[in-house]
Amino acid sequence: MANGDFITMQIRFTPPAGVNRAPLLFESTSDMGVTLLNGVRGIDLAPVTHKTARKGKGHGSTLQATQLEEREIYIPLLIDAPTVKELDDLRDKIVETVNPLNGMGKISITRTGDGKTRHIGAIYKEGLEGDYGTEYHGEWQTLGLLFLATEAFWEGEKVELSWPLTSTDK
């Protein structure tokens, strides 16, 4: 299997404190009926907004500020069960667990390469509206859960990144 054909992380959604629901675990191999698919988005650097001002003289602009913004996290899933009723029950369990009326939950990501885990507060935004079109097949369905994370930074084990400068960088 080529490196791009499998997911190199485990994702967990934990409902807010006080909600009596077990966390949801999303992996590329699952016996739970919920499988993580390729296409996860929003789990690295937060979107960036730069504020610039035109230069009074000359060309271009001057950078005045840089802001890391809130992010959307997209988690594509395959859910499957032996029967239509069991699939409905599984989908209901997911709906109850991510219910946005319960407040902010937590998304945790564990990288399988080094085992490091990080987490961020997140609230369900969309993906479980009841689309029974081309993605629904009776005993299985693909869907994508979209969460909103209002913080720009993840918490957890430190992951260091560096960008080496070359002689042409100024």
Image (cartoon, grey):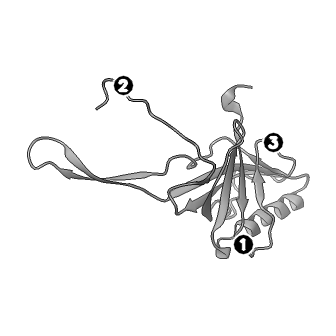
When asked about the image quadrant of residue 163, the answer is top left
Question: Marks 1 and 3: which is nearer the front?
Answer: 1
- The answer to whether marks 2 and 3 mark residues whose Cβ atoms lie closer than 8 Å is no
Within 10 Å of disc 2 (Cα), the crowding (few <14, some 14-19, many 20+) is few
Q: Residue at x 69, y 55 (%)?
A: 133
- The image's mark for residue 78 is none
Spatial separation of the CA atoms under disc 1 and disc 3: 28 Å
- 1, 45: nearer the viewer: 45
On-image quarter of the N terminus = top right
Judged from the image, the secondary structure of the residue bearing numbered disc 3 is loop
88, 58: nearer the viewer: 58
Name the residue carrying label 1: 17
Q: Is residue 125 visible?
A: no
Q: Which quarter shows the C terminus?
A: top left
Q: Which residue is mark 3?
A: 29
Q: Which residue is mark 2?
A: 166
Q: Amino acid at mark 2?
A: Thr
SS of the residue at dot 1? loop
